[in-house]
Image (spheres, helix red, strand yellow):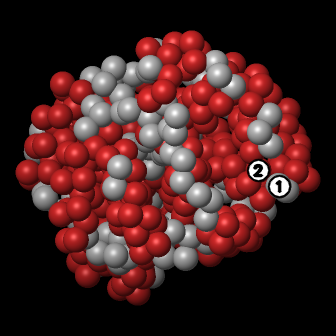
């Protein structure tokens, strides 16, 4: 029987199908182009091979094409007779994801990985910061992800550069930079073209307050990564943040226009939303003028790509876009949708995003007292919204700016004193005067 790249048996006798499936998995896991095309080749070589249908379904879902994802998942389910226990569980897991049953997928994940710890395609759905666990809305989800990767590490070893990059990133997000650095550096040395290691390097530099290191590394690294790679634009977002922190606003603005703005972003819809909104809002917090045209493009994109609430991290950024547009009706409607999902136990982060939405709207209306009242109580719970520390600083910096604008400098200093050790200096206008 043929096996995949991690030694797991596959229910195909076609080496052509197996090889194409392995190529597709590699591209999908490393965010390089060509995953769906490789899965198509595997299906053409063996139409009865179920796994590439499931992998294709999830890849389509990640790209925002839910209808096509459901069609591919139906094809996988139709081929489920006679599969091994591992493959049946694998397809069942992806079926839950494609159906939008994240709670069911969260429940199925531990047992599947306990039984088949090297099922890397399943692990790949949760190994990164915004994966299944990181978007679960649970208290302590960063620690939960690290505990999972700690537990699985013996099954991958130090020579698996893909796993090691994610393990290092999880350590970094949990504040253990000393343990994170050698893992990230080892992963990058083993495969210098690994975008997850590049991503972890950027995050570690951010957490250590070293924008110069981020600029020096990313400016060179991204030139060798395909522009249509799923992490290309997001890595340029990191580079732009480093430029913004370092005071090179011209370079930051250029990257927005050329590499990750809403009209040029190469990643999935959620990345296009999050990176554009985050940068434009941070740009203003740093004291630079509003890009009205860019915000208009973002608003139009939100209306077409995210018609309803569902994912807290995306909903957070949508709230900013609605606040900037002054679209209070849209903001209130999304909060109603979130409330309904929360009552149905389908929005675990509950009232965090509605509170943030009120805070952003109040800040935009220059009601700084109301912004502080909304944002201050949730500042210690932001992890439950999902996203990295770097991404969630969007909320923290807004609260900091509100303190400064309201002449609450003692609160600003207190907030800064409680920041993560070695966290970056916030690029917020007026901060220097508060010291």
The residue that label 1 is drawn on is 326
Residue 34 location (% of width, % of height): 35, 78
Left or right: 57 as drawn, with respect to 211: right
Q: Which residue is mark 2?
A: 323
Which of the 4 image quarters holds residue 37?
bottom left
Question: How packed is label 2: few (under 14 Cα within 10 Å), some, or many (20 or more)?
Answer: many
CA neighbours of label 1 inside 10 A, class few (<14), some (14 to 19), many (20+)? some
Q: How far across and down, in percent of the image, does residue 85 sit?
A: 43, 49
**Residue 338 visible in the current orientation:** no
Quick one: 308 or 429, which is closer to the camera? 429
Residue farthest to the bottom, as pictured: 44
Q: Nearer the viewer, residue 181 or 259?
A: 259
**Closer to us: 66 or 217:** 217
**Going 55% across and 60% down the picture, which residue do you hit?**
276
Residue drawn at x 40%, y 69% is: 254
Q: Residue at x 11, y 43 (%)?
A: 186
Q: Are marks 2 and 1 in contact (CB under 8 Å)?
A: yes
**Residue 200 percent across, percent down from the top left:** 28, 45
Q: Looking at the figure, which quarter contains the C terminus?
A: top left
Residue 221 falls in image quadrant: bottom left
Q: Is residue 391 above or below residue 34?
A: above
């Amino acid at each position: 029987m043929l096996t995949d790249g991690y030694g797991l048996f596959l229910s195909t006798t076609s080496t052509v199908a197996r090889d194409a499936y392995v190529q597709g998995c590699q591209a999908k896991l490393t965010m390089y182009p060509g995953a769906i095309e490789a899965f198509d080749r595997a299906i053409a070589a063996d139409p009865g091979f179920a796994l590439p249908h499931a992998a294709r379904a999830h890849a389509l879902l990640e790209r925002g094409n839910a209808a096509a994802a459901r069609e591919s998942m139906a094809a996988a389910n139709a081929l489920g007779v006679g599969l091994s226990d591992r493959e049946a569980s694998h397809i069942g897991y992806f079926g839950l994801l494609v159906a939008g049953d994240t709670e069911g997928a969260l429940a199925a994940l531990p047992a599947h990985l306990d039984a088949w710890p090297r099922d890397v395609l399943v692990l790949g759905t949760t190994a990164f910061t915004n994966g299944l666990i990181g978007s679960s809305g649970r208290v302590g989800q960063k620690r939960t992800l690290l505990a999972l990767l700690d537990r699985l590490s013996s099954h991958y070893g130090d020579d698996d550069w893909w796993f090691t990059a994610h393990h290092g990133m999880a350590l970094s997000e949990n504040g253990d930079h000393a343990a994170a650095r050698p893992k990230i550096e080892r992963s990058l040395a083993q495969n210098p073209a690994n975008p997850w290691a590049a991503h972890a390097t950027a995050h570690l530099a951010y957490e250590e307050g070293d924008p110069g290191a981020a600029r020096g590394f990313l400016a060179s690294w991204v030139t060798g990564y395909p522009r249509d790679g799923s992490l290309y634009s997001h890595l340029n977002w990191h580079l732009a943040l480093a430029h913004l922190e370092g005071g090179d606003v011209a370079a930051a603005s250029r990257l927005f226009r050329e590499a990750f703005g809403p009209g040029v972003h190469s990643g999935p819809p959620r990345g296009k939303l999050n990176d554009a909104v985050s940068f434009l809002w941070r740009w203003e917090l740093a004291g630079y003028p509003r890009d009205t045209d860019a915000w208009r493009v973002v608003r139009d994109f939100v209306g077409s790509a995210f018609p309803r609430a569902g994912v807290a991290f995306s909903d957070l950024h949508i709230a900013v876009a609605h606040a900037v547009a002054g679209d209070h009706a849209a903001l209130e409607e999304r909060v109603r949708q979130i409330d309904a999902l929360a009552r149905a136990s389908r929005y675990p982060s509950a009232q965090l995003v509605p509170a943030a939405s009120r805070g952003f709207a109040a800040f935009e209306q220059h009601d700084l007292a109301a912004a502080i009242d909304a944002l201050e109580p949730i500042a210690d719970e932001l992890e439950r919204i999902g996203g990295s520390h770097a991404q969630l600083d969007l909320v923290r910096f807004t609260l900091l700016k509100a303190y400064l604008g309201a002449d609450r400098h003692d609160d600003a200093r207190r907030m800064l004193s409680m920041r993560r050790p070695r966290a970056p200096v916030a690029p917020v206008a007026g901060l220097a005067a508060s010291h």
